[in-house]
Structure formats: structure tokens, C-alpha cells
Amino acid sequence: MIFYPNAKINIGLNIIGKLDSGYHKIESCFIPVSLYDIIELKESKENKLTLSGIKIDCSPSDNILIKTIKSFNTDKKFRIHLHKNIPAGAGLGGGSSDAAFAMIYLNKKFNTFNEDELLYESNKIGSDCPFFIKNKTKYVTNTGNNFDDINLDLKNKKILIVNPKKYINTSEAFKHIKPLTPNYKLKEVLENENIENWEEYVKNDFEKYVFSKIKELKKIKKQLKEFGAKFVSLSGSGSCIYGVFDDNTLPIREIKFDSYEVKVIN
């Protein structure tokens, strides 16, 4: 079986609290976009993962996909090949998407969980996994596992994601965030304000810390605005940054870093 897990971007990311469990309460809008990993999964005599594409700093035995297979408590073993196109440590949810798509496939095969159980179990694998089980534009709260519909349609926009090729450890980034409830409602802003006005309200709480670690991001953000982006933001905890554009002409040749032209899906 071959499937194609997609990336996501965050529009706004407010860290509004921390639970006794250590998880953080967030407010964000998650949007699935057309940047894909490729996974081939076949039954085998042992669980084995091979990798190609973008290198990831993780041994195959520790990869989230092996953890996902083991979560089904089945005697079946699988050989997995993962071709990485979505950079790791970039705020695009690539690992969580890989795991979620594998869970969907395995759950159809073994009929293990109902829909609510699948969402619950996926959250044990990764905090972004429940979103990728649904894989539709959502207003996201709590620890990233509460979803509401949002009246936001960016399918006529083009999005340019820029990768500075520097890894950000999410756990470390959270240590530098002081939870704070914003004085605006993200969902209301995104539904009612023109995109040109988002910058006044919509923030990513990781941006200050990540920009201090990756100096190039400030310049990239400025360039994207100069090239006509209607909105520019860090995605997730970084390190990728994106710009939302109106027209079909994106400044890919002008950007000195790896960049990906994507569209909103679902």
C-alpha cells in the first residue's frame, strides 16, 4: 500500500496555558497543504523501516511509524519505506501526518478502533496526529485535540513555504514560552478580518524565540512581504516560514533557501 501524508501550516499559534500533565493548551488554525511524504507499507516477517529523501535525525527503530504499528498490538509485521519530502523540525507536522495516515490504513485493515477511539489513540502517538486523522482546515484548541469548523477558505491563494534548513526542537522551544491569553479571538479575526489586517492581530508565540535562534528568518519574512505576500508567519514551532499570495507568480527564484509552492487541500 502506498499513501501520501501531507503537511500543514498554522495560521496563528497562541500558547494560552499549561496543564499538570506538561502539555500546553493552544489556540490555532491548522490548514492542510499540498506538500507530501510518500509511504509504502507491506506485510513482512519483521517490523523494518527504510528511509530516503530528506534526512531525519532519528534511527529507524525510534521512528514514529514503528511506534504507530506497535500501538495496534497485532502479530502482523510490516516493512515500511518512508520517502521524506516534508522537512523535520520545521513546524509542518510531517511526522504526525506520517503516523496518522499509517493509523488510518492499519485501522481499516484490522478494524481496531471506532472514530473516537482512533482520535484518542492517535493523540498518544503525537499531539498533531488527531488533526491529520481529520485532515481538514480546523480551528484547534486544548492540546491540539479539540476541533471546530472555521469559515476560512484560502483555496484561491498560493502559499510559499521557505525552509531555512535548521532544526527546531519543539520541547526546547516550549521552555521559552510564557503562556498568555491574547486579547482577541483568533477564530473571529480569521473569519471576519481581511487577510491584509491579520498581521495586526494574528501572532505565533514561538516567533520571538525561533527568530532569535535562526537569524535568517527575519530577512526571509521581510523579503516575502516585499514580494507581495498578504500574510507571513512562522508555522508551528518552526523553523519553516510561509507567505500567502494572491496571484500565481511566486518569488521562488528570489529566495535563496529551499522553498515549496503549495495549495490548501480539503
Image (tube, helix red, strand yellow):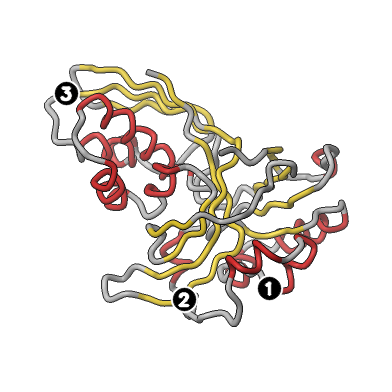
Q: Earlier in the sequence, mark 2 or mark 3?
A: 2
Left or right, 250 with reference to 211:
right
**Structural distance between the alpha carbons of marks 2 and 3:** 42 Å
Identity of the residue drawn at 23% across and 27% down = 47
In x, y percent, where is residue 55?
A: 50, 36
Can you give x and y, in whole percent of width and height, for residue 179 in the image? Answer: 47, 79
Q: Amino acid at mark 1?
A: Tyr
Reply above or below: 183 against 115.
Answer: below
Horizontal placement of 5 versus 253: left or right? left
- Name which residue lies at 73% across and 68% down: 199
Q: Are marks 2 and 1 in contact (CB under 8 Å)?
A: no
- Residue 253 image-quadrant placement: top right
In the image, 257 versus 127, the foreground residue is 127
Q: Position of residue 248 (x, y in %)?
A: 83, 37
The answer to which image quadrant residue 70 occupies is top left
Q: CA distance from mark 3 to mark 1?
A: 50 Å
From the image, which quarter does the C terminus lie in? top right
Residue 201, which numbered label? Answer: 1
- Determine which of the numbered discs, if any, sits on residue 76 in the image: 3
Q: Is residue 115 left or right of residue 54?
A: left
The total of numbered circles placed on residues is 3
Q: Amino acid at mark 3?
A: Lys
Label drawn at residue 157: none
Mark 3, mark 1: which one is toward the viewer?
1
Vertically, is 255 above or below 107? below
Q: Crowding at label 2, few (<14), some or many (≥20) Cα neighbours within 10 Å?
A: some
Circle 1 Cα neighbour tier, 10 Å, few/some/many (<14 / 14–19 / ≥20): some
The image position of residue 238, as x and y in percent, is: 57, 57
Q: Which residue is mark 2?
A: 16
- Which residue lies at the image location 37% right of the left edge and 26% below the top edge? 50
